[in-house]
Image (tube, coloured by chain):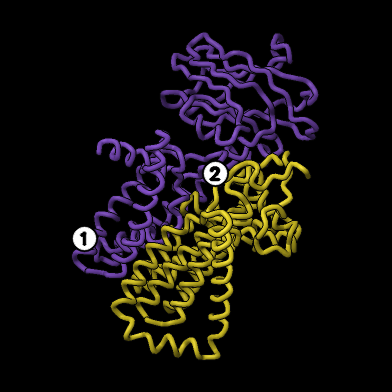
Chain colours: A purple, B yellow
Amino acid sequence: MIEIIFFFQRWLYLVEEGTINIVSHVSLIKDPIFVEIFNILLIISLLFLVWCLVRKRNKNILLLFLIFLGYVLFIFFGVNYSTYLKTRNELEGVQGRYLFPVLGPLVIIMAYSLLNVFKNKLINILIFCFVSFFFIYSDFGYFYSNYYKWYFSVPGLSYKYGNVGQINKGQSSPKQVFSFKENSEKNYGLGIYISTYSNEIKKGFKVNLFDGDCNKILWIYEPKKIKDNFYLSIKLPNNLDKNNNYCFNIENDTSNKPITVWYSSVDLPGNVFEEMDKDLIYDLLDQETTERFK
Amino acid sequence: MDRRKLNLCLILALSVFLIYKSIFFNSIISRVKQPDYDYHSAVLKIYKENPKVLFFRDRLKMQLGCDDPIIYNPPVSTSPFLYYSVVGKVWYLTNSLKITALIQSVFGIAAIFYVYFLALIVTKSRIVSFFSAIIMSSIPMFSYQINYVSYDNLVNLASIASIFYLMAFINKLKIKDLFMLFIFLLIGILTKFSFGPLMVVILTILILFLFKNFKFIKNDIFKFIFNVKNIHYILVLLFFAGLFVSFYGRNLILYKSLMPAYSYNFEHRCDL
């Protein structure tokens, strides 16, 4: 029983994560505040659904709920939980999109419940406006203002792979050699995924660009701010020779707040998503696109 | 402005927004892959290169070389084929994967409109229906996925359409809705095997409903069948039913399973 509860919690988290974010080979995971608001709306909807069903006895809504529940129970017990018992891997076959066949009924139940919480028409219009704005912004609005970070995570540079560890004050990440994509005519930049364990860091870090032997510093970039779970987009100088190797590292010059570094190869399927809990993913972007969205 | 016009304007605005999103996704971030992109596009390509094939009756006609980099799991010849067969033909005709991806956004947008009409039947409220359509079109993973090649788009459409016609039939007792329900159930199960559980849930509800109400509608069913005006419903249903029987029947007889398990040598031919 405890095992089912444990798996159900994990399953619920993964399904929700894979529905209200974009979870793919390269994922776009939203800030936790969006998930919290979504959870509140969902809980209000489900609580009110029970009340609605008892009070108003809307048979159609009950039927929709039965269709939703029947399918979800089948997927949960018949597919996901049985797979988990065999493999002991809670990620195996659990995806938010696998519940999309019954997403429509869930959405209708949610809309119906939210617009029936209050009898006052004006309040309902306000709920309609607020929730619509929340959904539209948290989908296309959020995507539109963040997609360049996501877009940049498509491989264009090649680099090595390795776990680096925490960078405390006075420390640097190991120097990382990278090369430009073969036959590329574009100028490239560097996109770096960072986690900080704290709030915004405004100074103390710098990114050093070295020659291919990692000896001579060619260029230094000092980010104006580093946030938690943040893509730092760095435009590389235009005069780099595409045929040469280069090298970079991140140096904690004066900050008492550490960051942790993770080198990752994003061209492995699912890698960016899987490593999101780790700390730093070296990523890439092309300059042409950067300039377009500056 | 009266309510009907306002509603029309809102639907129009939502449509324009969805089309814009679709074009945006396809044109600007086409490099980002949706889940299982390699598999879906590889299978689509097989159907594109064999435009006369509805589904592969003989797995050896697949012509997959030993060195093919895609792992065809599930196997192409014995897995539900409808999405690949239809969209593969679109790709063949347009000769552009981008246009093909754009065209298949129609499945997703149609699914959103089915949500709107389903909500209208269930709640009888236009504001709830429109609210449902807005939420549905703004679920990030859904609104992202409907822009890329994936059989999930057709199966999601079949799912929501099936639920819509089930509810429409239960509420209005129109036989046309019953036929449409069966057509979309067959489309779903010919597109993706995991549509099966939903099909079972829907059929269970339908059988329970018919068990109670059959005496009231049996005459209507016969009238509908023998009315020449409804011939197209019957022909389309027979077409999909024929595909269902020939495809899953073949799997059962030849491979003793509705969905034969994958092994590398199943379709790959090393003599190519």
Q: Is residue B67 above or below residue A177?
A: below
- Which residue shows up at 47% across the image and 58% down it? B195
- Which residue shows up at 21% across the image and 60% down it? A51
Q: Is residue A108 left or right of residue A238?
A: left
Image location of residue A100, percent across then percent down: 45, 55
**Residue under circle 1?**
A51
Tell which residue pokes out farthest to the left in this image: A55
**Neighbour tally class for label 1: few under 14, some 14-19, many 20 plus, Cα within 10 Å:** some
Q: Which mark is residue B204?
A: none
Q: Give the quadrant of residue B23.
A: bottom right
Q: Is residue A118 left or right of residue B48?
A: left
Q: Is residue A292 above or below residue B92?
A: above
Q: Nearer the viewer, residue A180 or B231?
A: B231
- Which residue shows up at 43% across the image and 42% down it? A17
Q: Is residue A248 above or below residue A272?
A: above
Q: Quadrant of the C terminus of chain A?
A: top right
Give the mark, 1 or 2, whose residue is nearer the N terminus: 1
What's the residue type where badge 2 is placed? Ser
Q: Secondary structure at mark 2?
A: helix
- Which residue shows up at 30% across the image and 61% down it? A113
**Residue under circle 2?**
A145
**Neighbour tally class for label 2: few under 14, some 14-19, many 20 plus, Cα within 10 Å:** few
Image location of residue B156, percent across then percent down: 50, 59
What distance separates the C-alpha of mark 1 from that of mark 2? 38 Å
Q: Nearer the viewer, residue B61 or A281?
A: B61
Q: Number of callouts in the render? A: 2
Image location of residue A210, percent across then percent down: 69, 15
Mark 1 and mark 2 residues within 8 Å of each other at the beta carbon: no
Q: Nearer the viewer, residue A216 or B78?
A: B78
The numbered mark 1 sits on a residue in which chain? A
The answer to whether one can see residue B259 in this image is yes
Q: Is residue A238 left or right of residue A70?
A: right
